[in-house]
């Protein structure tokens, strides 16, 4: 039987720690500010953005919210980013993804000052991660490492298999596991005999974007399984890329959806905002 990794509780603990840090900075009249830009009204994005703003409030981080119309030009968005780059009081700039089709995502992410790129999506920060330089690590992969550490799951020397190769999760989590001395394999949609590969894993990170695809047949008994997916099932309930009921009896530890990786993503984003302020003091 697996241990259920309570991401919500671990995130709450981290947020308590961060709240204290914000209060400590406030004693020296130092404030932390996150600017969140949303283009359009994608319902999922609205939920996430509200969640981020609520967490900022909880921790005493100032949040600036820019809700731009769906039809906003790329030029307009870029000029807002330039303005926020130049503002001394802004520590973090987050452009909620996905962006509408007429806007080039890459150009937008490249325009954010890497020192304020608390999402860690700018090529500078991507490079910094791969060569161990100081930068910003994206919230989801950073949150996964924190979950493993705080659950006493050792990474050093372990067989780690990541399913998914996105810039946001798959590639950066592979880098982080490698930095922790894991033996890392990245599997993806072209992988032949996926089950054979995933069955090797002591730590299996699932970020494929397919609802409940990974069942017990993909999992070695005793593995730790981290589910990064977020979907809705037939009953409109949130669920992940992992079939939780099927995997729970064979794994040694497993993250639920909701209440697993998701809350950690936001906690680590907040951590990056505070870190940004500190570095720029
Ligand atoms: N620039 C940018 N940065 C992001 O970090 C970013 C983004 N764009 N676009 C969308 C994805 C998705 N994402 C999530 C954050 C929190 C939860 C989360 O808190 N999930 C809760 C449930 C929330 C709910 O009720 O829907 C949970 O799993 O327990 C999920 C997903 C951040 N993203």
Image (tube, rainbow, N blue to C red):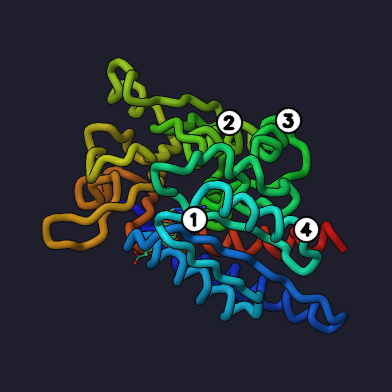
Q: Residue under circle 4?
A: 86
Q: Secondary structure at mark 1?
A: loop
Image quarter for ligand 1: bottom left
In this rendering, position of residue 216 left or right of residue 129:
left
> Which numbered disc, 3 or 2, marks the residue that appears first in the sequence?
3
Measure how far apart labels 1 and 3 are at the Cα level: 27 Å
- x and y percentages locating residue 7 in the rendered image: 45, 62
- Residue that extends furthest to the bottom in the rendered view of this protein: 27
Q: Is the residue at mark 2 in contact range of ligand 1, meaning its CB lies under 8 Å from it?
A: no
Q: Residue under circle 2?
A: 157
Q: Is the residue at mark 1 in contact range of ligand 1, meaning its CB lies under 8 Å from it?
A: yes
Specify few, some or many for label 2: CA neighbours under 10 Å numbering under 14, 14-19, or 20 or more: few
* Disc sitting over residue 57 in the figure: none
Q: Residue under circle 3?
A: 131
Q: Secondary structure at mark 2?
A: loop
Residue 185 can be seen, yes or no? yes
Residue 224 appears in which quarter of the rendering?
top left
Residue 7 can be seen, yes or no? no
Q: Which residue is pictured at 77% across the width and 69% down the height?
A: 89
Give the number of callouts: 4
> Which numbered disc, 4 or 1, marks the residue that appears first in the sequence?
4
Q: Which residue is pictured at 72% across the width and 65% down the height?
A: 90
Contact between labelled residues 3 and 1, with CB atoms less than 8 Å apart: no
Q: Which residue is pictured at 58% across the width and 44% down the height?
A: 108
The quarter of the image holding the C terminus is: bottom right
Measure how far apart labels 4 and 1 are at the Cα level: 20 Å
Residue 118 appears in which quarter of the rendering?
bottom right
């Amino acid at each position: 039987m697996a241990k259920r990794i309570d991401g919500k509780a671990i995130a709450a603990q981290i947020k308590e720690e961060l709240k204290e840090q914000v209060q400590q900075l406030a004693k020296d009249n130092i404030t932390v500010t996150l600017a969140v830009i949303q283009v359009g009204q994608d319902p999922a994005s609205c939920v996430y953005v509200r969640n981020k703003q609520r967490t900022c409030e909880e921790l005493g981080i100032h949040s600036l919210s820019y809700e731009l119309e769906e039809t906003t030009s790329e030029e307009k968005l870029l000029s807002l980013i330039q303005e926020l780059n130049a503002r001394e009081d802004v520590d973090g700039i987050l452009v909620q993804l996905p962006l509408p089709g007429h806007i080039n995502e890459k150009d937008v992410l490249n325009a954010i000052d890497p020192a304020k790129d608390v999402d860690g999506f700018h090529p500078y920060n991507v490079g910094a991660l791969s060569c161990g330089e100081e930068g910003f690590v994206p919230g989801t992969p950073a949150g996964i490492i924190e979950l493993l550490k705080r659950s006493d799951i050792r990474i050093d020397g372990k067989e780690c298999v990541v399913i998914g190769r996105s810039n946001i999760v798959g590639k950066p989590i592979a880098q982080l596991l490698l930095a922790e001395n894991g033996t890392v394999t990245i599997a993806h949609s072209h992988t032949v005999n996926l089950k054979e590969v995933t069955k090797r894993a002591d730590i299996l990170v699932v970020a494929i974007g397919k609802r409940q695809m990974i069942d017990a047949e993909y999992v070695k008994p005793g593995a730790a399984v981290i589910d990064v997916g977020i979907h809705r099932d037939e009953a409109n309930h949130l669920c992940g890329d992992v079939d939780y009921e099927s995997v729970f009896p064979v794994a040694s530890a497993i993250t639920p959806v909701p209440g697993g990786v998701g809350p950690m993503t936001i906690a680590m984003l907040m951590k990056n905002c505070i870190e940004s302020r500190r570095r720029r003091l």
